[in-house]
Image (cartoon, coloured by chain):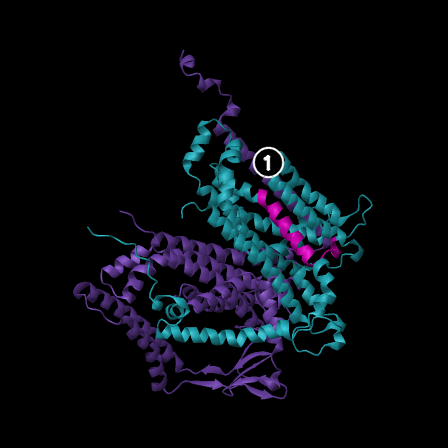
Chain colours: A purple, B cyan
Amino acid sequence: MKNKTRPSETSVAFYNNPETRAVIYQILALASIAFFVYFMIGNMFENIEKRGITTGFDFLSSEAGFGITQSLIEYDESDTHGRVFIVGLINTVLVSFVGIVLSSIIGLLVGIGRLSSNFMVSKLCMVYVETFRNIPILLQILFWYNVVLAALPGPRQSISFFDSIYLNNRGLLMPKPLLESGFIWVVAAFVLAIAGVIYLANWAKKRHDETGEEYPVFWVSTAMIILTPILVFFIVGSPSTLEPTVLKGFNFVGGLNVIPEFMALTFALSIYTATYIAEAVRAGIEAVPKGQKEAAYALGLKESTVLKKVVLPQALRVIIPPVINQYLNLAKNSSLATAIGYPELVTLFAGTSLNQVGQAIEIILMTMAVYLTMSITISMLMNYINARMQIKGR
Amino acid sequence: MAIYGKLEAREAPSNTKGPIHWAKENLFKSILSSVLTLFSFYLMYITIPPLLDWMIFDATWSGTKEEIVNDGARWIFIAEKFNLFMYGFYPPEEYWRPNSVIILLLAAVYAFSKLNNTKARVAIILAFPVITFYLVSGGIFGLEHVETEKWGGLMLTILVASVGIIASFPIGVIFALGRQSHMPIIRSISIGYIEFIRGVPLITLLFMSSVILPLFFPEGMDFNKLLRALIGITLFQAAYIAEVVRGGLQAIPTGQYEAADSLGLTYWKKMGLIILPQALKISIPNLVGSFISLFKDTTLILIIGLFDVLAMVNLTSKDTNWLGFETEGYVFVTMIYWVICFSMSKYAQSVATKYNTER
């Protein structure tokens, strides 16, 4: 007679049981997706056969046959599509890296500027943010490329700085440092200096913990990192020469050429992303309660210590996640280079190579995989940082 | 017995108010501050007057191309190409159709805010896109059919953005609910979709929808270029909407879910009547932010060969009669985008302040 005392257990039909339902729903969802995928893959193979498209990744080892205007590794027309992929990938990384450095600097300055007590500075920073954030990034890239850089004079009327750096509508030309074998010593000195700085910082912290005495770690380490390599450079007899860039006929030869596509892309990406970074920096600093600062002052800490030990550690926790997100956006936005023809992954591989080979599925999936790997790696890194920076409660 | 008289409030000392004091406090408080102030003024001096000269005082506002004497902006180019910038290649005698969509939109928004009937509101939301489509595309009621290839300019930009917003919204909400679901398979499908879309650039998705998508469907099922772009943009935007809505869902206290459960509501009633109205309300500022991003991202359709308002700059400056007028075109389009995005972001801010009850 248990049934009578607890009627609910039996009176519920099996299809009304939430657990059974959950299983049914999930099987349905899975089945419909499986059907959809089956349907699409089937059509895909049929269409590929009809259109005579080859499949597989053999094209990666076939000859590309087109030139690339900028490559950090050796490349010529007889290289393979696989090589094109690598060249594009490196150029994507290059433009993202330069963009991230520039946008961080601008963003940090503008973000702090917006909180400045100086009326003019804070208003100018606000105007900067509100202007560039509300203009599409593609429009900014095209504007820099088609209007600003196109207005530069031709090679013979170049704007020159110190008669060694030239700016014209073919790009920025500057002398190229040629490294000789002795340069390895300079690199070694630089690495040693960094190791020394780490040791120094540990020693200074230990001494501070024990005796309370301060040591100007920042200034000493900056001097070490800059001065040691320079000193070694001259001691081993300047193992580097500059290859100048010279005007011959109608164009410049030799030296290092920064192509206008690269300049337009980095300017636009940095200026656009910097507005978001500036907002993140401002929000982070504003998120630190005023009482924290006042309490630190009340303890008698000096201003730089308050900033370094009280405000920044708390602000950074708020600032870092959105800023890393913006770095990721910058890297993804670098794909817009395809509108002005800067030779990066999307332009070269998903553009020129795709047009030649015609294997859209493989090529676009490979391109997507690159960005996806980048995003997932960075978001995993971000989760790790977030976990480490979380306030540990008692 | 002391007699207390009433004293008039004294004026604040003259050195704590007035413009000079304000300047001392806000512009010249320290040496660094003074240097920055002077530098800011210098920056304004070298940028603003030339810009104003170019845009207004030295600009050519009327006349023909041959009569240009000023070296400022030649706005007659914009006046000449205005219809291209607005409507693309849409036949001029049919301009009243996209125009009436705008009037219809205002009417719909007005009716939407006045009606308190949910069914009527849903009817408006469902009917509006259909009416708009048939009005712009034609082909029925004696309206001349206009192929999508002829759609262009600002009209196309707004159309793509609106379709992206309207179509991605329900998909985004579904994925947000899926990500919060207790069913592991549903949850992993949602997470997989959202993270995949957010991990790749929009341009690769647009390439995918314009090159690969036709391969996935049987022959004869033909998507035109615009529809492919719309599919790509909708799939993209849905993932971002899902993340915004998830943020809103997470902000709803567990008590609300439990209260709805204890009332015996079904899942959809619980979500539709209790959770989503609250979650969507607090996500409005972020939703608007996501719409602004989408509006800016619609410019990418020019890369797959559609003629939105930005593509028109390139197109019009190729006109042999009007070579070298890109600058005016870019500045004009910049102003259009800036005004629209800026007003939307101001709206988002005002909503955020209105709904923020914690301050």
Where B182 falls versus B80 (above or below)? Answer: above
Residue A170 or residue B16, whichever sits in front: B16
Direction from residue A167 to residue B301 in the image, left or right: right
- The residue positioned 69% from the left and 50% from the top of the image is B102
Q: Which residues are magenta?
A: B148-170
Give the percent coordinates (x, y) of residue A380: 43, 53
Residue A338 or residue B32, whichever sits in front: B32
Where B62 falls versus A328 (above or below)? Answer: below
Residue B161 painted magenta: yes
- The residue positioned 61% from the left and 60% from the top of the image is B337
Looking at the image, can residue B188 be seen?
no
Give the percent coordinates (x, y) of residue B232: 62, 51
Which secondary structure class fits the magenta region best? helix
Could you say whether the residue bearing mark 1 is in a helix, strand or loop? loop
Looking at the image, can residue B315 be seen?
yes
Which residue is the extreme one toward the top? A1
Look at the image and tell me in which quarter the N terminus of chain A lies: top left
User: Which residue does the numbered mark 1 point to in the structure image?
Assistant: B116
Q: Amino acid at mark 1?
A: Asn
Which chain is mark 1 on? B
Residue A162 or residue A255, whichever sits in front: A162
Q: Quadrant of residue B52?
A: bottom right
